Image (cartoon, rainbow, N blue to C red):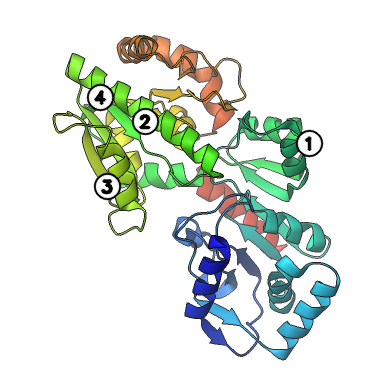
Amino acid sequence: MKKIFILLKNILKAKIIFKNPETREVVIFNSYQLNTYKDLFEKKNYFCIEVPEAGSDDYFTLQGNKIEYIYISISILLLILKETLKKNFKISYYLALIKIVKPKMVITWIDNDNRFFKLAQILDKKIEFFAIQNAYRMEVHSRSKEKAKYEDSKIYIPNYLCFGQQTEDYFKKIGATVKKFNIVGSLRLSNADQYLKKNNLINSTPKYDLCLISESLVYGTPGALDMQKNELGIITKYADKLAKKYNLKTVLVLKRAQDHKLHNSEINFYKKILDKNSPIIIKSRQNSFSSYEAAYNSKLVIAARSSMLTELLAVGIRILSCNYNKDYSFNYPDFYDSYFSISDNTYDKFEKRVLFLLSMSQKDFNKHAEPIKNYMVDFDTNCLPFEKIKTQFDTFLKG
């Protein structure tokens, strides 16, 4: 009911355009976080299809995505009816728009969206579909085998512009249908790295000893949310205790900006854990790269499942993943439960591992990080993800 209510609320606020959209070479399906990748295209060359929420059918955020425009015409209505008769009702509007816009390619930044998978299955023979990986994809042990098999079987990506070899190995392991993998690295990481360097925001000496990365507190089912809160709560408590004991300068970077609907619930979650004497500095999100700025200026970054962990390791920053719920795996034997990841949820184990990582020589860090970091997220300063992706798109459109 909550999903339906927010969907109707978004639709009622949208501007109705009583005509067909113009033809374009590129359709961007689900224009969520468009600023991250819009420079890949000329404005006049793409058409955005807005959708009410991000992610797969099982992922739902309370704030939803705003729908600014809804197109209605006789042609669109007839196509919707036609697709409904083919039992494609849920995606009939999107199919109608794509068929009218007549693009050469359809691109999404939300690479785990079941609607994109279905669209690609239906239109793959006529239009080229590309998905740009925006978050780390891992094996989640909390799913039943039946549910995992069902969800993984729905994945259909003709062209996957992914983080690294780990992504390819993982999708092949779970039996997902991906026709072509193209390892490009993380576009978000690349954008952040360039932004921080261009604006001289990386200190020669780290500003913080520890950096805690907050994660979404609205994730999946209520049961999964409770598990995540438990995990983040333990990490925060342990970091607070450690910071007090060893006088470690620690920053906690929130996921939400102050004007975000979920900001208050996020900051209140942490304030209930930390007392007034806590040395941990809480910072709200100021821009798209706030978390990266804090992380780049810290000796060690700590989180649970954040994609930032694998991204930061790729650029040579020390990380610690605390998998206290034991519900996921980084799918690499030298990473999971080794130097950069722990599942033992005792404070003693946390303290020993953090102090070990802080005191590890750069030589030893490089030795243990080297086999893993590029496997998870490819990072090449001589050929950045933006350049790789843009070259591929431009070549395809000119071909």
Residue farthest to the left, as pictured: 277
Residue type at mark 2: give it: Gly
Looking at the image, is 196 positioned above or below residue 108? above
Point out residue 324 in the picture as x, y percentages from the top left corner: 47, 23
Judged left or right of residue 70, residue 298 is: left
SS at badge 2 = helix
Report the Cα–Cα distance between label 2 and label 3.
Answer: 18 Å
Of marks 1 and 2, which one's residue comes earlier in the chain? 1
Q: Which residue is mark 4?
A: 240
Q: Which residue is mark 2?
A: 233
SS at badge 3 = strand
Q: Nearer the viewer, residue 218 or 19?
A: 218
Report the Cα–Cα distance between label 1 and label 4.
Answer: 42 Å
Point out residue 230 in the picture as x, y percentages from the top left corner: 42, 30
Of marks 4 and 2, which one's residue comes earlier in the chain? 2
Residue 272 appears in which quarter of the rendering? top left
Residue type at mark 3: give it: Ser
Of marks 2 and 3, which one's residue comes earlier in the chain? 2
